[in-house]
Amino acid sequence: MPERGAREVVEELFRRQQAGDETYLDELIAEDMVNHAAGPQGRNGLAQILRTIDHDLGPVPLEQHHLIADGDTVAQHLTLHGTHRASTMPLLAGLAPSGKSVTWAFIHIWRVADGGIVEHWACRDDMGLREQLRT
């Protein structure tokens, strides 16, 4: 079977994440993935970040706007849709859960090697999310 390209790996990541597949991280993210966006590292670190987001804002359906691939690198523009249920992530520290519906825009950059994601960068609209939660 031919190796999938970087775009196909990220497409599968998105599809399986949205379908609630609990195995997608183990199969698509390298155990030692480098997260240049800071925070916990590796596959387990990404899982921790995603659990925290889901805890605070979940469930969190994602809307994909753009997916652009160049060789082993893929840029993905997403909007997360959620409800402010808790404030355990540092970005929301000090905010009482409001129950407000929110959107949060992201641009992820993924690097793929050997059929799995090995590096990640992100740009998030944190100020836009905070602004939605102002009282």
Image (cartoon, grey):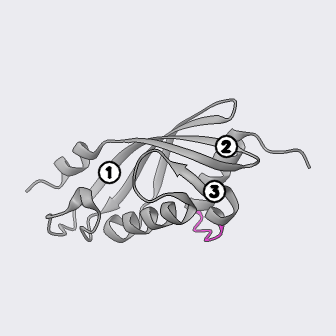
Q: Is residue 40 above or below residue 6?
A: below
**Label 3 is placed on what type of residue?**
Ile
Q: Quadrant of residue 97?
A: bottom left
Q: Does the magenta stretch include residue 63?
A: no
* CA distance separating discs 2 and 1: 27 Å
Residue assigned mark 2: 112
**Label 1 is placed on what type of residue?**
Thr
Label 2 Cα neighbours within 10 Å, binned few <14 / some 14-19 / many ≥20: many
Percent position (x, y) of residue 35?
49, 49
Element carrying mark 1:
strand
Magenta extent: 19-23
Residue assigned mark 1: 103
Q: Marks 2 and 1: CB-CB under 8 Å?
A: no
Sooner in the amino-acid sequence: mark 3 or mark 2? 3
Element carrying mark 2:
strand
Q: In which quarter of the image is residue 59?
A: bottom left
Of 121 and 42, the residue lying toward us: 42
Residue assigned mark 3: 29
Percent position (x, y) of residue 62?
47, 53
Sooner in the amino-acid sequence: mark 3 or mark 1? 3
Element carrying mark 3:
strand
Q: Is residue 108 left or right of residue 89?
A: right
Tell me how many marks there are: 3
Query: Residue placed at 60% from the left, 36% from the top?
Result: 74
Q: Is residue 130 left or right of residue 21?
A: left
Q: In which quarter of the image is residue 101?
A: bottom left
Of 29 and 34, the residue lying toward us: 34
